[in-house]
Amino acid sequence: MSASRIPGRQLPRAFFEESPEQVAPRLLGKILVRRVRDGKGADENRTKHLAGRIVEVEAYLGPHNRPPDPAAHAHRGPTPRNAVLFGPAGHAYVYAIYGRYFCMNVSCEAEGRAGCVLLRALEPLHGADRMERNRGLTPGAAARQLTSGPSRLCQALGLTRPLHNALDLTDPASPLQIRDDGFAVSDVRVTPRIGIHVAVDWPLRFALRGHACVSGPKAMR
């Protein structure tokens, strides 16, 4: 896929300058796109795009929220790890878990307020063969095996903290973008967040109802 064929239009910063609980459901159906090199020798600068439709997200509230969100990385204020969350909206916040996997969030709200949205699952759209290799799966693996779950989707797209944390998703030159191709979202399921141990009853998880790529047990889809 050439640069001119990247699907949809890039989301502007204003899209992300709302509270996480507003941004999160609006991200459903949008497309996460990563530009990667796909050539060797004379073609080493040739690029392709890995892309997936966002089908599941979770909102995490900034420390100004009352009460503060104890599950949010920013709830005790800025640190070297979470500094990007306190900057302008529309940036990637990528962090490591278990010492080897990564998760990606998108910063929200006005600068200094540190809300964010965790991307929990994608539906693969472009570059499934590369995603399979990145995940160490055999060709023809089910889409759910590729990008269902926050660390799986980062592994499939090759997203890491050293390379992608703090990237501006609204910059046309950014190798990581979120785009809108006009996909219509008609049925959204709202549930408590999963995989956490505090504020477990807050209804801040949003997913396309019944979609096969949504993470967690079938009861959560």
Image (cartoon, rainbow, N blue to C red):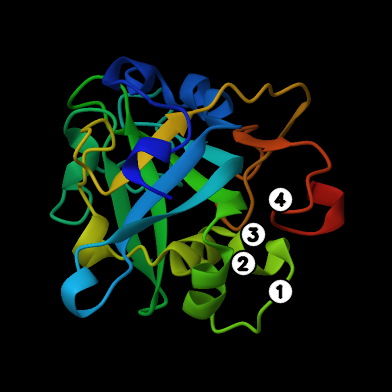
Q: Kindly report which numbered mark, 2 or 4, lies closer to the viewer in this rendering.
A: 2
For label 2, the residue is 146
Q: Position of residue 183 (x, y in %)?
A: 63, 25
Under tag 4, what secondary structure? Answer: loop
Which amino acid type is marked by label 4? Val
Whether residues under marks 4 and 3 lie with C-beta atoms below 8 angstroms apart, the answer is yes
Tell me what residue is drawn at x 23 percent, y 54 percent: 165
Query: Image quadrant of residue 217?
Result: bottom right
Whether residues under marks 3 and 2 lie with C-beta atoms below 8 angstroms apart, the answer is yes
Q: Kindly report which numbered mark, 2 or 1, lies closer to the viewer in this rendering.
A: 1
Residue 78 in sight from this viewpoint: no
Whether residues under marks 2 and 1 lie with C-beta atoms below 8 angstroms apart, the answer is yes
Taking 56 as reference, is 14 above or below it?
A: above
Q: CA distance from mark 3 to mark 1?
A: 12 Å
Q: Kindly report which numbered mark, 3 or 1, lies closer to the viewer in this rendering.
A: 1
Whether residues under marks 1 and 4 lie with C-beta atoms below 8 angstroms apart, the answer is no
Q: Residue furthest front?
A: 42
Closest to the observer, 10 or 151: 10
Label located before the other in sequence (1 or 4): 1
For label 3, the residue is 148
Label located before the other in sequence (2 or 1): 1
For label 4, the residue is 214
Is the residue marked by circle 4 packed among few (<14), some (14-19), or many (20+) residues within 10 Å? many
Q: How many marks?
A: 4
Tell me what residue is drawn at x 32 percent, y 18 percent: 17
Q: Is residue 85 left or right of residue 190?
A: left
Closest to the observer, 150 or 199: 150
